[in-house]
Amino acid sequence: MSDDTTAAGSTQRKLECPSAQPGMENARPIGVIAGSATETRIAFFKKETLDQFDWRSRFADAEATRLLRFGATCDESRCAHFSSGRCSLGKRVNDQLAAVVDDLPPCLLRSTCRWFSEQGRSVCLRCPQVITKIPRAEDALNAVATAQGSQD
């Protein structure tokens, strides 16, 4: 991951999107989709799991999102969910979805995660239910995922 140098000369890491597309900058899988069709959950990877996993050689981008959840460098203003310097998707996940775990799940992104940076620990308790390809029957997730459902 690259660092940015600010005008003041300090080095700051770019924040990462925990709900990324596989074609985004620095994309890598952060978990596998598990659970059931009506109650999906992400089983988050440990770093050691990914060291030998060449997902690009096994999946096309479109196929990968049916099985894996991705993190990547946040696209910021190039993303429909980014507004006023913040991620509206992370806010909606935090505000509109119920927590699905009691403790912080293992996470490869937390130190650079935009959602965690902006929403704090509570968004992490909701994060395991977020998937990229949402089945039509998942009304709550679809409502949160659409920018029109924004309550910023």
Image (tube, rainbow, N blue to C red):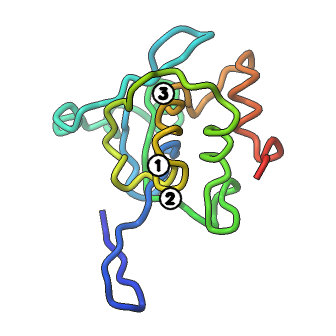
**Residue at image point 40% right, 85% down:** 6
As drawn, the residue found furthest toward the right would be 148
Q: Provide the residue designation for mark 3.
A: 128
Q: Provide the residue designation for mark 2.
A: 74
In the figure, is residue 50 to the left or right of 21? left
**Residue at image point 34% right, 38% down:** 107
Residues tagged 2 and 1 counted as in contact (Cβ below 8 A):
no
Q: In the displayed structure, would residue 6 be above or below residue 97?
A: below
**Residue at image point 44% right, 55% down:** 16
Displayed quadrant of residue 46: top left
Distance of mark 2 from mark 1, alpha carbons? 13 Å
| Viewer-nearest of discs 3 and 1 | 1
Is disc 1 surrounded by few (<14), some (14 to 19) or many (20+) residues within 10 Å?
many
Residue type, label 3: Pro
Q: Which of marks 3 and 2 is nearer the N terminus?
A: 2
Residue 76, how many percent across, how many down?
A: 58, 64
Distance of mark 3 from mark 2, alpha carbons? 19 Å
In the figure, is residue 100 to the left or right of 107? right
Residue 12, how many percent across, how many down?
A: 35, 73
Residue 68, how many percent across, how many down?
A: 43, 30
Residue type, label 2: Cys
**Residue at image point 64% right, 47% down:** 91
Residue 51, how many percent across, how many down?
A: 17, 39
Q: Provide the residue designation for mark 1.
A: 116
59 and 35: which one is in front? 35
Label number found at residue 107: none
- For mark 1, give the secondary structure: helix
